[in-house]
Image: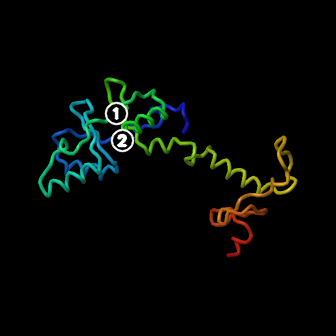
Amino acid sequence: MERDVSVQEVMDREFVGVSESDGLRETAELILEEGADSAVVLRGADPVGVVTERDALATFVRAEGESADVSEAMTDSVPTVSPQTTIAEAADEMSAQSTQRVLVSDGSELLGVLSEHDLLSASPFAPTASGPASEVGERAVAGVSAGRGAGATEPGRDDRYTDQSVCEACGSLARGLSPFNGQLLCADCRDI
């Protein structure tokens, strides 16, 4: 995880907001319609809790067909962090509070929600256009197109392996990978 990235850079600024007196069935339908996994419960403009898909389901099962309000299902102890909090600090807060999300507030206004998914997206292991995974892909493509004696190499680099890359189908180190159906494949895998 990039330790110096702030919550503000990765939080979700769009969230579903409901009130405590809203019907739980309507709230669950809204969560599903919006493709969200939770709704922030607001009293006026102030956040007072969160209701998740799981909270709604548990309340429906306990209510046995009775109608319920959001206040009966919501979790009212949701941690809040400032937008300048680092994602490492936010992850620590989530872990300490055993929660999957924190609210992001500047003190007077709710700015967004940070979920575990947002933290994973900010991880250095998440695939990005310029991240470590793409660098490996770029080196593999360079190895395929460059071939032997392609020119300048990095200082101190062992040239015996510059024209080899990893086959995306079998994982073996091979020379002469070729693109096939969106993958770089060795001769054996292309023949299958």
Where residue 2 sits, quadrant-wise, is top right
Left or right, 5 with reference to 149: left
Q: How many marks?
A: 2
Where residue 160 sits, quadrant-wise, is bottom right
Mark 2 packing: few (<14 Cα in 10 Å), some, or many (20+)?
some
Left or right, 77 with reference to 10: left
To which residue does mark 2 refer?
99
Q: SS at mark 1?
A: loop
Determine whether label 1 and label 2 are within 8 Å by CB.
yes
To which residue does mark 1 refer?
79
Mark 1 packing: few (<14 Cα in 10 Å), some, or many (20+)?
some
Image disc number at residue 66: none
Where residue 47 sits, quadrant-wise, is top left
- Give the residue type at disc 1: Pro
Q: SS at mark 2?
A: loop
Residue 53 locus on image (x, y percent): 29, 50
Instruction: Look at 36% across and 41% down and name the residue there.
Output: 99
User: How much space separates mark 1 and mark 2, taking CA atoms?
Assistant: 8 Å
In the image, 46 versus 89, the foreground residue is 89
**Rendered position, 105 above or below 14:** above
